[in-house]
Structure formats: C-alpha cells, structure tokens
Image (cartoon, rainbow, N blue to C red):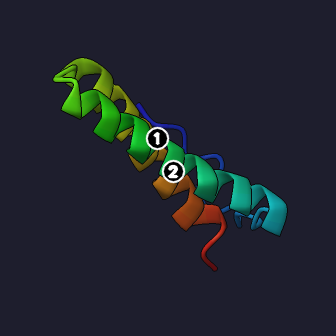
Amino acid sequence: MTNNALANKEIEPYSQETCQKIYESIGTFVLLADTEWKKEKEKKAMFYSTAASNYATIYETVCSK
C-alpha cells in the first residue's frame, strides 16, 4: 500500500548552499567507492556507490531546476 498524500505537492528547491554541499557529497562518496573498490572491498564500495547514487537523485530532484 502506498501513501499518495504528498503526490501532488510541489517540491521546493533547496538553497544554493545546500545544493553545493549535496553536490560535494556526491563526489566524496564516489571517491570513497573507488578507493574501496581498488582495495577489493566490494561491500563497502557498493555502500558508497549507492550513497552517491541516492545523493545524485536528491540533487537532481531538488537542485537541478
């Protein structure tokens, strides 16, 4: 069962400062994922890669308008 209460609600863009911090976090998580991948620590690499992907989705949703 899904909750559609906020489905039609307009999402307000984040401030430029907040968006910049999110953008920087994406780069940090990608760097950490690459570092862990090179150490052959696949679980940690996947964790950081997923975090980067999630932050990128957030950035795209609330910052790239």
Residue type marked 2 = Ile
Q: Quadrant of the N terminus?
A: top left
Q: Please report the residue visible at 50 percent of the width from the left and 52 percent of the height from the top.
A: 27
Label 2 belongs to which residue? 26
Q: Please report the residue visible at 54 percent of the width from the left and 38 percent of the height from the top.
A: 3
Circle 2 residues within 10 Å: few <14, some 14–19, many ≥20: many
Residue type marked 1 = Phe
Position of residue 13 relative to residue 37, above or below, is below
Q: Are marks 2 and 1 in contact (CB under 8 Å)?
A: yes
- What is the C-alpha distance between the residues marked 2 and 1? 5 Å
Label 1 belongs to which residue? 29
Residue occupying the far bottom of the picture:
65
Quarter occupied by residue 47: top left
Q: Is residue 38 left or right of residue 51?
A: left
Circle 1 residues within 10 Å: few <14, some 14–19, many ≥20: many
Count how many numbered circles sit on residues in the image: 2
Q: Position of residue 48 (x, y in %)?
A: 39, 33
Q: Please report the residue visible at 71 percent of the width from the left and 61 percent of the height from the top.
A: 19
Q: Is residue 62 left or right of residue 33?
A: right
Q: Which mark is residue 15?
A: none
Q: Position of residue 60 (x, y in %)?
A: 53, 66
Position of residue 21 relative to residue 44, above or below, is below
Residue 52 in sight in this render: yes
